Image (cartoon, rainbow, N blue to C red):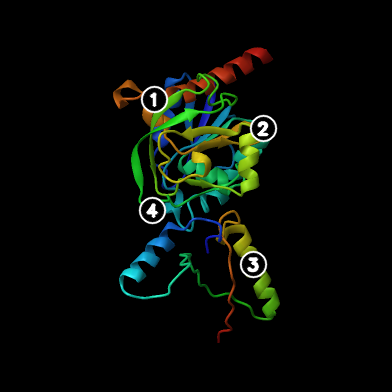
């Protein structure tokens, strides 16, 4: 069974939803407390949403130095799939595993509502099961979700199809190029501001987010099957 | 301090508020944050102290993608 580690920091609050969504996609999902220094043979790592360390200093700035992060960084360097959702995306940017930064929404206020995003690349372990260009409705819930990066970095992300999700119809937080999710160069590390785990069950009103987790388990199954 | 090229909505809001209060000629308002702390520096030079604080800024206190920083040292008792 695919083993998915969900990292828990003090202040994580989407951990249980994320664990359930990974389980529903057929994974064995389990929590890893941030004080741990290894990932218990994880096949994939998800850093869930929330307010790790109260978002003090900057969102993700303190979490990025917690004891579990060297293990996550080593796992990512080895090509292991890592997904950061919302606060997890902020942590991955602070850690330098993803380029750019997430700053205060252009409209200043915290936003918590559904938005529409387009899947710009299906060439990642977290989006492989989507139709290219699929438009999804997923909730956002963040105060610091405006994606910014130096213009050279933005150009490179666009040129190499590393913008994974993009807001459509409106740009809720003023992100550069309406970017809602990006990947690293190797495409194994992905960060996104919308919450797929909150749109992964019929009783939540939206199910399209489930494909993020199914993409992961399918990619790993294919990989495991191929290796055997 | 947010980088000059970065949109600073808080700064804009503060600027509008100052304008509304009748303060004329205010422009380029930027909202950043200030951190103050004491640093035990017995036997070390001012340069060493500044170097240490610079490292703190680069590693943790400021995000190099979005923020610039200035360091002000004040010798205490």
Q: Which residue is mark 4?
A: A108
Q: Which residue is mark 1?
A: A200
Q: Element at badge 4?
A: loop
Q: Residue at x 52, y 36 (%)?
A: A181
Considering every residue shown, the one lying at the far front of the view is: B25
Q: Quadrant of residue B55?
A: bottom right
Q: Element at badge 1?
A: loop
| Disc assigned to residue A186 | 2
Disc 3 + disc 1, Cβ < 8 Å:
no
**Mark 3 and mark 4: span between their CA atoms?**
29 Å
The quarter of the rendered structure image containing the C terminus of chain A is: top right
Q: Which residue is mark 3?
A: B54
Same chain for labels 3 and 4? Say yes or no: no
Instruction: Tell us which disc is closer to us: 1 or 4.
Output: 4
- Of labels 1 and 4, earlier in sequence is 4
- Crowd rating for badge 1 (residues with CA inside 10 Å; few <14, some 14–19, many 20+): many
- Of labels 2 and 1, earlier in sequence is 2
Residue A67 visible here:
no
């Amino acid at each position: 069974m695919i083993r998915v580690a969900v990292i828990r920091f003090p202040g994580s609050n989407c951990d249980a939803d994320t664990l359930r969504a990974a389980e529903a996609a057929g994974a064995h999902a389990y929590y890893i407390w941030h004080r741990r220094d290894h990932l218990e043979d994880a096949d994939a790592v998800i850093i869930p949403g929330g307010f790790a360390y109260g978002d003090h200093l900057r969102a993700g700035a303190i979490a990025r130095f917690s004891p579990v992060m060297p293990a996550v960084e080593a796992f990512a360097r080895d090509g292991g799939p890592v997904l950061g959702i919302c606060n997890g995306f902020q942590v991955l940017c602070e850690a330098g595993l993803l380029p750019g930064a997430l700053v205060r929404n252009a409209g200043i206020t915290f936003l918590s509502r559904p938005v529409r995003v387009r899947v710009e690349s299906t060439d990642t372990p977290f989006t492989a099961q989507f139709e290219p260009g699929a438009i999804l409705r997923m909730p956002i819930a963040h105060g610091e979700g405006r994606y910014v990066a130096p213009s050279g970095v933005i150009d490179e992300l666009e040129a190499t199809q590393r913008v994974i999700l993009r807001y459509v119809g409106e740009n809720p937080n003023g992100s550069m190029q309406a970017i809602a999710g990006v990947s690293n160069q190797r495409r194994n590390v992905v960060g996104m501001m919308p919450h797929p785990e909150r749109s992964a069950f019929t009783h939540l009103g939206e199910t399209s987010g489930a494909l993020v987790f199914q993409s992961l388990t399918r990619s790993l199954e294919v990989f495991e099957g191929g290796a055997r | 301090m947010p980088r000059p090229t970065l949109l600073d909505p808080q700064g804009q809001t503060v600027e509008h508020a100052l304008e509304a209060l009748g303060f004329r000629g205010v422009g380029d308002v930027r909202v950043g944050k200030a951190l103050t702390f004491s640093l035990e520096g017995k036997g070390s030079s001012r340069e060493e102290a500044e170097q240490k604080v610079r490292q703190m800024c680069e590693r943790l206190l400021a995000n190099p993608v979005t923020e610039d920083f200035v360091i002000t040292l004040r010798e205490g008792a």
